[in-house]
Amino acid sequence: MAASPICVAPLPARNRAQRRPLAVTPHRLAANRRNAARSTGPRTAQGKARVARNAIKHGFFAGPERWTSEQQRDFEETLTGLREDFRPHDAIEDACVATIAESYVRMAAMLRYENLAALKYHQQCEREMNALIAAAGVDEAARLTAHREQLRRAGLWGPTIPGPREARAICRYQGRLDRAIRDATTILQGLRGRRATSSSGVLSVVRKTAEGTFGNSESVKTNPLRASASSGPEALRRPSNAPADKIENAKTNPLSSMFTGNRHQRRRAKAMARRSRPNP
């Protein structure tokens, strides 16, 4: 029997991206306008407030004007504590401190969202597991139930981590907040270091001026390095016929052979010094 020339196999479904866009005809445009006129949207204040947050996924980077009262309180407390620690001197340093406080508040909101995302993902996994158990056979259902109970006893079946998409977003946003805190801290430390350097430069100029004015009134007490070579107990122990540049000790010449090397070399140097010393 010859094969039928008609193919009864279903054709593969065309991808949505390959579908042609619908042509907007005047008749279709008029129908869209009539349908849009029937939908008035939310009418109550609660409904409008709920719809206004449809575009917000997590609210990590929402403006401070859209923060809750708890976030506003946390920001004020954090900003006050950071101002007491850093003590900003100008508007730029205060802006850096405010950036750090704002980043900490957003990070706290991110941690709360992480807990909610983990709970949501766990509930999704629970529904999927129940669907698998309901669709499986008796043996497979018993095995899946036993496996879930084993995970629950081990503490692994619970809201531990969020889903893959939320986890990637949390890691990305946490890195952004960490960089914001680190950059603000670096700028703040740089400004404070520059101010400290300028202050030390002014003090050094003042110190040099004072030294130039009162440098001639130095004495042995104010500057021991200016003491005369003929003063002190070394001058009493020095022979009268010995030149001043030949008298060495650990303070005047610490690199002398009498005070360097091992103990045998030091003993030999001391003995030679005693032999070469003229008798009084």
Image (cartoon, rainbow, N blue to C red):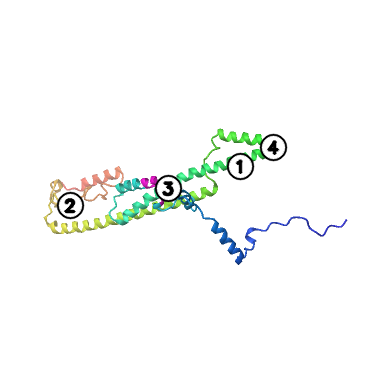
Q: Nearer the viewer, residue 231 or 134?
A: 134
What amino acid is found at the position of numbered circle 4 in the picture?
Gly
Question: In the image, is residue 137 above or below residue 257?
Answer: above
17 magenta-colored: no
Which structural element holds mark 2? helix
What amino acid is found at the position of numbered circle 3 in the picture?
Met
Circle nearer the N terminus (2, 4): 4
Circle nearer the N terminus (3, 4): 3
User: CB under 8 Å between callouts 3 and 1?
Assistant: no
Which structural element holds mark 1? helix
Q: What x and y, as percent, mark residue 184?
A: 37, 54
Circle nearer the N terminus (1, 2): 1
Q: Nearer the viewer, residue 102 or 211?
A: 102
Whole-number angstrom distance, CA of label 1 to CA of label 4? 16 Å
Q: Is residue 243 visible?
A: no
Residue extending farthest to the bottom is 26
Q: Which residue is mark 4?
A: 137
Point out the image quarter for the N terminus. bottom right
Q: Which residue is mark 1?
A: 128
Whole-number angstrom distance, CA of label 1 to CA of label 2? 87 Å
Question: In the image, is residue 36 above or below residue 168?
Answer: below
Say which of marks 3 and 2 sits in front. 3
Q: What x and y, as percent, mark residue 185?
A: 36, 52
Whole-number angstrom distance, CA of label 3 to CA of label 2? 60 Å
Q: Which residue is mark 3?
A: 107
Q: Residues within 10 Å of mark 3 (few under 14, many from 20)?
A: some
Q: Which residues are magenta?
A: 66-74
Q: Nearer the viewer, residue 18 or 266?
A: 18
Relative to 235, is 61 on the left or the right? Answer: right
Q: Which residue is mark 2?
A: 225
